[in-house]
Image (spheres, coloured by chain):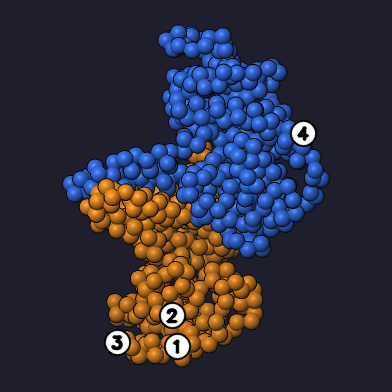
Chain colours: A orange, B blue
Amino acid sequence: MIKILIDCFGGDHSPEANVDGALAALEKYPDLHLVLSGDQAVLSPLLESRSYDAARVEILHAPQVIGCDERPTDVIRLKRDSSMIKAIRMLRDDDSVSAMVSTGSTGALVAAALTRIGRLQGVIRPAFCPLLPTMNGGIVGVCDSGANVEVTPEHLRQFAIMASLYMENVYDVKNPRVALLNVGKEAEKGDELRQTAYKLLSETSEINFVGNMESRDLLSGAYDVVVADGFSGNVLVKTTEGTALELLKKLKADIYSKLLYKLGAALMARMFRDEKEFFNYQNYGGSVLLGTSKVIVKGHGSSKATAVFKCVEQAYRMQLSELGPKIEDTISKYEHYEY
Amino acid sequence: MIKILIDCFGGDHSPEANVDGALAALEKYPDLHLVLSGDQAVLSPLLESRSYDAARVEILHAPQVIGCDERPTDVIRLKRDSSMIKAIRMLRDDDSVSAMVSTGSTGALVAAALTRIGRLQGVIRPAFCPLLPTMNGGIVGVCDSGANVEVTPEHLRQFAIMASLYMENVYDVKNPRVALLNVGKEAEKGDELRQTAYKLLSETSEINFVGNMESRDLLSGAYDVVVADGFSGNVLVKTTEGTALELLKKLKADIYSKLLYKLGAALMARMFRDEKEFFNYQNYGGSVLLGTSKVIVKGHGSSKATAVFKCVEQAYRMQLSELGPKIEDTISKYEHYEY
């Protein structure tokens, strides 16, 4: 049995999308159990209108609502009865629960996870690792992408180890090619942080370090894992998403500007639909937080039911693959580097 | 008279593209004079086969060639007779020459510029400011995008002032909207550098600071200048270029996969050509180095003649607009912030 908590409030399409996504995963995985966190008065009627295996679903009543602009620290302090914070507490206290999925505020989730949920043994800083599609049909993970805006070379080495094991064990990528995000390919490029990290990563035999990556090559398919500080990793991921979205939006606007283009596009309707799906980051699951003692998956705020389903599936597979113990085992082989 | 130096070697299409681009600018601007730097034995025959106003063109003989993988410091030290380093020396020593355009190694150019060419009075660090097209048909400048991988809040303020004056005086953008690249929109987001810079930019009345920008909004058209450290600014610009290129490449491959799509695309051929031009960064000129006492424009290594022409035009307009004295004037109004 694998029991996963779903924070049912906080996303643009919550709670319906969260409930429906979770129930879809329930149907697919017979040993999956769900705890749905949120206002019982809203969740109960929602569940009643769906058909599902009620024996494997329970509700964690959490009536408080988190506002859009609330500060993470205020959420932890003042919203103890919100769906997110109650779920975090249950994740911490209940040994039968192994993972949590949330589409709520990233800042609040990170703050709550780091202060309430322990880290895997030896891990200094948990880090986010979202996945993006590459041009040859594969995926690439970027770690960290926002949990740690300031990092040391040792943090970067741990991100590399965790993300590499994640890709290998959860996505069956053999011997993942790990790169360091930098402003040029040569070893001596970048600031002191990058230069030291390059050296450290080169010395880490448990990963397949292939050198520096320039950001323009992210989608090329030449890399499986890209290691970065949380600030530039965030810029890398969000710029990719933003550019793809803006470009597709521009294409659409231009198509509607001329009858001839509209005719042409009609013949290509299926292709454009496919492109849109290809660049729809919801299809690649959420951003997992690597390094916490229990699995936490952050879904996009705009997640629909399919995206939530992918997140639950991700959490399920992470738990099944015993990623946590594997990370602890590998990290224990390295003395912390003194810098 | 405005005299501009052209480093004719170093780009993928040099020296032909550099010579042709420069001569096109010569034809457009009657008071423009050119100094073409490079091997006379190559440049003379090239010029002889073109028709142009020979009275306004001279050659600076520089026979040495810079290799692709040479370290910037080695270039400065060992390649004194290369087209780039001889040009930098002439730019420094000859008062009649006001600007330089190069498509050679960025690292070598920055190193040579910073050590050989002085800075404008009050400027602590020169910074690159490339331009990107926005979705509403405008442009946005990103400063810095790679000259300074480590910066202080005061550097960021100076980048904001320089880039704002650049957009206003060279591109007629009225009251440019200046944003700080950050991982979220709220003032308290990011590391200490970003938080202090936010405060400092808010207090700088000479610029129109509109707050933090998340990287996904770069192309939205809501900003005219984005201020960043050279590392994340580089990631921002290169990721945008890379994603747009990869996406257009994917569209092309997908079109060729089915006859129906090929038919549709035939009707839309003009549109696809326009999109490609829209996202062709060469159409928006080079990356100018703001803050040096003489104008330096870095063209893309893959620059063709049109791109070189745009770079020369940029340098010409920067000189004409008296951007340098305006930057000195504004920067002198601010005491350096102590951090």
Q: CA distance from mark 3 to mark 1?
A: 17 Å
Discs 1, 2 touching: Cβ within 8 Å:
yes
In terms of sequence position, does the residue under pointer 3 or pointer 1 come before the other?
A: 1
Going by the numbered disc 2, the residue's amino acid type is Pro
Circle 1 is placed at which residue position?
A42
Of circles 3 and 1, the one toward us is 1
In-front residue for pair A28/B211? B211
Circle 4 is placed at which residue position?
B121
Circle 3 is placed at which residue position?
A51
Query: At x 32% / y 77%, what residue is drawn?
Result: A24
Above or below, comparing residue A139 to residue A4 in the picture: above
Above or below, comparing residue A10 to residue A330 in the picture: below
Query: At x 81% / y 45%, what residue is drawn?
Result: B335
Q: CA distance from mark 3 to mark 2?
A: 17 Å
Q: In the orientation shown, which residue stands out farthest toward the left?
A: B259
Q: Secondary structure at mark 3?
A: loop
* Disc 1: CA contacts within 10 A as few (<14), some (14-19) or many (>=20): few
Q: CA distance from mark 2 to mark 4?
A: 58 Å
In-front residue for pair A329/A280? A280
In terms of sequence position, does the residue under pointer 1 or pointer 2 come before the other?
A: 2
